[in-house]
Image (tube, grey):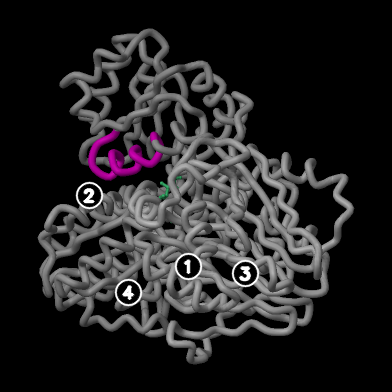
Amino acid sequence: MCGIIGYTGHLDALTVLLRGLEQLEYRGYDSAGIAMLSGEGEDRLLIKKAGPVATLKDACEELEVRSHCGIGHTRWATHGGVNDTNAHPHIAGKVTLIHNGIIENYHNLIEKFGFRGSLVSETDTEVAARLLDYYYHGDPYEAIRKTIREITGSYAFCIMFEDIHDKIFCVRNVSPMVAAHMEDGSFVASDVTALIPYTKRYFVIPEYQIVTLAGDSVSVQDLKGDPVTPEMLEVNWNVEAAQKNGFPHFMLKEIHEQPEALRNTIMPRLENGLPDFSEDGIPDAVFSGCDKIAIVACGTAMYAGMVGKALIEPILKIPVSVNIASEFRYESPLVDEKTLVLVISQSGETIDTLAALRLSKECGAKVLSVVNVKGSTIARESDHVFYTHAGPEIAVASTKAYMVQLASLYLIGCRMSMARGKFTEAQARDFISRLTSSISAVQKILDNKKRIKEAAAVVAKAQDAFFVGRGLDYAFSLEGALKLKEISYIHAEAYAAGELKHGTIALIEEKTPVIALATQDHIYGKTISNIREVRARGAFVILITKTGAEIPEDICDIHFAVPVPHDRFTVFPVAVILQLLAYYTSDLKGLNVDKPRNLAKSVTVE
Ligand code: F6R
């Protein structure tokens, strides 16, 4: 949600900034802009354009000025429409500023400081720039301290002052920001993907501390001015992982990376065929000491949680709730010292999920988070972290992160069942062996994906699509519908198959695609009956079953079989079919698969 990059050093700042913005564009692509300090006595240079980074790049083509210090921003609009004026950076007097987050009290600040009538843009960010300039009398630290004392909300700010020619100042609250220094200079960015071409060592900027980037150093101080030594982290993936590597889109590449992501997440946690979390530092007491589980997440991560619930609850026989983070935080949730709160987040920065985590801790619950990004805020604030090892996920639509979130929930469910005496060692070993065999089932779907494209050709012509299933299949179908609607803009809904006839079946017309999931033996017959109901009304049925299932005559138009013998594990290959169906549908419609309209990766606003 907005990408920010800053650089000072001996390299050409324009090149570094544009490259960084390209890497960060998945965080927002409404507009992009850069500002550079072009040296003693000269003006600041500001270029900002509505549209993608490519438009900004074109505008910079003829630029002759060379600079070694600058900041860049790619925007996901919140306050103010998408246009050049509202694009960042914003300039006020001596201050140039970029921002990721939301300043909640910007209206009050406008009144309190008399800014009304003199603002150029409609953004909350410009108010922060004005405030900084108001307080700036030559001491950047004093101005920053005074400004953040006035501001409520979330922010990651990168600030340049007109009369300080080679330095960038940064401060944040909630919104993510990382920094690094190496021989080439000093860098700051919203996330490490922009730093990877230069270094693997970085640190997460601590909240409410001021970071100063100079060409030869990066220093951190607290609000009293005392120096702070940040904790250095190291990325465990390389620059290729954040590139397309021959695939037309990041999404397709990431779908294909799933077998490896599953292996990386599962295998290091197996000891003698059983789940072992000693390397993660997660003791069994976390699993045995609770009497209920509350899963909290947003979007795809929440749908992974729905699968987790459908899997775990019947085995553990304790209540497992799945909660939309943005609702949970405002609803006095039933969470106490005996609740294990399972927080799921790819980015580890989703603000609603983070707020739900904080609330859970206030209620005395233990928080175990399943997170992909090392050192992210959710990871740092949880009691225990279970890292997924998907590597960087660049496509806005989540695929491989979902897959490893599922694998993590399966591992956690298995360990928890052992810790609570619900699984014998032999049962746990059998569960794990089925889990690891699912990886080859995922690979088989990838190897035979051509037919999925044929199915997508039909879906691409539709205005609506329905995903139906019962039990675990229903949980899988929720994610299938989300994937399709977010990248193909086709209205898609997931329904528990038996529920459709209570209203929604009215929407089924001749050729309406219904993606029917029937991979659960104990309810197979029931699901087939529900499919007959839509079939009778002309639906175009794409049926997914296990290999070997008995398919009644004329029940579907297209059939896919997943090579997984046990019902509990069908989600892994099913997810790939649904992801590819969405991918090909979007691609056939000629849409921007990796950057669907109105969306952004890492949702750091409420
Ligand atoms: C959809 C998607 C989103 C995210 C959601 C939570 O494809 O990616 O629904 O799953 O915004 O994000 P994280 O997992 O980063 O908390």
For label 2, count other residues whose C-alpha is less than 10 Å away and answer few (under 14), some (14-19) or many (20+).
some
Does any portion of residue 104 appear in the rendered image?
no
Please count the marks in the image: 4
- Left or right: 79 as drawn, with respect to 417: right
Q: Which image quadrant for residue 189?
A: bottom right
Q: Nearer the viewer, residue 602 or 553?
A: 602
Query: Which residue lies under the disc numbered 4?
Result: 382
For label 4, count other residues whose C-alpha is less than 10 Å away and answer few (under 14), some (14-19) or many (20+).
many
Query: Which residue lies under the disc numbered 1?
Result: 265
Q: Which mark is residue 188?
A: 3
Residues shaded magenta? 469-481
Image coordinates for residue 42, horizontal then vertical, percent: 81, 62
SS class of the residue under badge 3? strand
For label 1, count other residues whose C-alpha is less than 10 Å away and answer few (under 14), some (14-19) or many (20+).
many
* Front position among marks 4 and 1: 4
Task: Say which amino acid is labelled 3.
Answer: Val
Query: Which residue lies under the disc numbered 2?
Result: 327
Q: CA distance from mark 4 to mark 1?
A: 19 Å
* Front position among marks 3 and 2: 3
Task: Say which amino acid is labelled 2.
Answer: Glu
SS class of the residue under badge 4? loop
- Left or right: 582 as drawn, with respect to 340: right
Q: Residue at x 15, y 78 (%)?
A: 289
Q: Residue at x 65, y 43 (%)?
A: 249
* Front position among marks 2 and 1: 2
Residue 209 part of the magenta-drawn span: no
Q: Residue at x 77, y 82 (%)?
A: 183
Q: Are marks 2 and 1 in contact (CB under 8 Å)?
A: no
Task: Say which amino acid is labelled 1.
Answer: Thr
